[in-house]
Image (cartoon, helix red, strand yellow):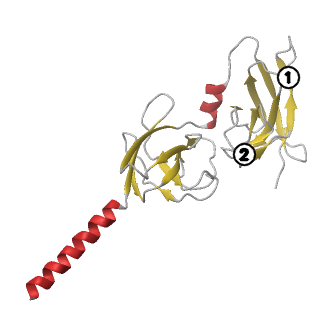
Amino acid sequence: MRGAVLWTLAWLLLSGFAAGAADAALLRGRVADIDGRPVAGAKLFIYDTANVRRPATFISPPSAADGTVAITVPPGTYWVVARFKQDESYGPLMPGDKHSGEPAVMDLTTEAELEQDFTVADIREMGRKRQTIAADSLRLKGRVLDPEGKPVAGAYVFASTIKAGTRIPDYVSAWTGADGTYMLALPSGPKYFLGVATAFPPMQPWRTSAEVVPVDGKTDVVLDMALALD
């Protein structure tokens, strides 16, 4: 009788373990920089909705030296971004921190295991990547100023073909220095809407505060941008 009871308990424990295993999905990732080199210390931020401007539903352990990372989550559909922060905090991205941009949508409802590559870059790298070197490009430059007219360091200017949005803007400058100066190269186009931010990506939904219309034959435009302080 005692043996039967022990066998029943063992069977229940094994059944519970198997059921628990069936309720988990494995997400594997590889994080690299824009040159394809692995990034160690990056984390996957996993959300159960498309709103990735809130605390993550799950956060992976840091990526290994070869850029690989894995995390087990309940089955579901997730929005996943990779981030690398130099100070290992969970706040807004600052100069030198890296981000993978738009979230990858991953359906883990039918697959027990999925793999995804992520490319992370800091704002300076993304600015270089998105700027054009065409001869007819518009070079926008100036300073970012606070409401008192003083230069703002650690800010950047972004440009988009729409006034507001939630995706990463089409073009971004590098971070401003102590003098608040920025430079942003834009391809020829009908109109661009401009905004300023101090965290990358900008808060969502972001909104622009100025606009510029390229003029034929004019390749340099000087425009100071005002940073609204909360």
Q: Is residue 183 visible?
A: yes
Q: Residue at x 23, y 75 (%)?
A: 12
Quadrant that contains the C terminus: bottom right
Q: Position of residue 82 (x, y in %)?
A: 51, 45
Identified at 39% across, 45% down, the residue is 114
Q: In x, y percent, where is residue 17?
A: 27, 68
Residue 57, placed above or below residue 2 = above
Using the image, tell me which numbered label, if any, was put on residue 110: none
Q: Nearer the viewer, residue 106 or 30?
A: 106
1 or 2: tag closer to the N-terminus: 2
Query: Marks 1 and 2: CB-CB under 8 Å?
Result: no
Residue 226 at what x, y percent from top left? 86, 41
Is there any visible trace of residue 224 in the rendered image? Answer: no
Q: Dot 2, crowdedness within 10 Å: few (<14), some or many (≥20)?
A: many
For label 1, the crowd category at 10 Å Cα-Cα, with few meaning under 14, some 14 to 19 and many 20 or more, is: some
Mark 1 to mark 2 CA distance (whole Å): 22 Å
Q: Is residue 150 left or right of residue 39?
A: right
Q: Nearer the viewer, residue 133 or 9?
A: 9
As drawn, the label of residue 221 is 1
The three-letter amino acid code for the residue at tag 2 is Thr
Residue 84 drawn at (x, y percent): 52, 45
Q: Is residue 19 left or right of residue 207?
A: left
